[in-house]
Amino acid sequence: MAQRPVFISKDKYPYYHLYSLNFSYHSGFSKAQKQKNIAALHEEFSKTVLARNGMKITEISSKSPDPDAVKLSAFNLNKFVPSLNRSVPLECVFQSGKVFANGGPYKDLLEVTPRAAKKDERLKTSGRLIAFEYEGVRYPLEPKTVFYDWLYLNACLENPEVAAAARFSSRSKNSDCSIKSEISKSSKL
């Protein structure tokens, strides 16, 4: 069994409700295994009172069965970086902005693939995370996820066609999830 967050959108602050969902986990790293997990998570969601009340779910990740939701993955959604005068994958912007007690930000991560940025060893060996930095401006760790949320929302605003396509394909869906996100990681980044 595994537990993953499902974010239910709301019209009023805080604009979402975090719903924890347990499902049968299929171990493995292949795309097929990850898609089995997505299907299992969606199956469990379909058994909830939320689903019985007409709520739908969409998986926003590079492994999503919905091609529009794949475009919204941090690995595929681009964020404009003024100092580079070009857009790069959001994942690279986020990872490059981490400031640790013993290093960072690692701006060279803006020049690598999202996978390479996320797996860069310096992110594990530079001590504790103390802040974020983007374009010379420091951002605090609290409130949790605010820096990532700000980057993500700005990337969506910069890519209205992607956001619009996802909104159109999931207009009857009002909850989002990412199979890779664990509850504890969501709160700690």
Image (tube, rainbow, N blue to C red):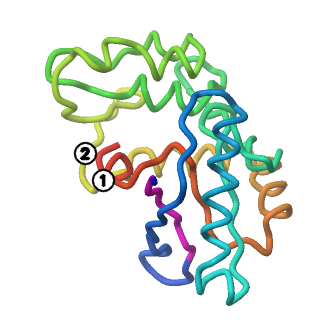
Q: Is residue 149 above or below residue 74?
A: below
Q: Residue at x 54, y 55 (%)?
A: 24
SS category of the residue bearing label 1: loop
Question: Where does the magenta region start and end?
Answer: 2-9
Instruction: Confirm whether the magenta stretch covers residue 177.
Output: no
Q: Is residue 137 above or below residue 120?
A: below
- Give the labeled residue for mark 1: 144
- Which one is in front, 99 or 60? 60
Is residue 131 toward the left or the right of residue 48 in the image? Answer: left
- Which one is in front, 117 or 47? 47
Is residue 13 toward the left or the right of residue 77 in the image? Answer: left
Residue 168: quarter of image:
bottom right
Disc 2 marks a residue whose amino acid type is Leu
SS category of the residue bearing label 2: loop
In the picture, which quadrant includes the N terminus? bottom left
How far, Cα to Cα, is label 1 from label 2? 6 Å
Q: Is residue 175 above or below residue 1?
A: below
Q: Residue at x 28, y 19 (%)?
A: 124
- Give the labeled residue for mark 2: 141
Is residue 47 toward the left or the right of residue 126 in the image? Answer: right
In the picture, which quadrant includes the C terminus? top left
Asked if disc 1 and disc 2 are in contact, CB closer than 8 Å, the reply is: yes
Whole-percent x and y of residue 175?
A: 62, 69
Whole-percent x and y of residue 74?
A: 60, 37
Disc 1 marks a residue whose amino acid type is Lys
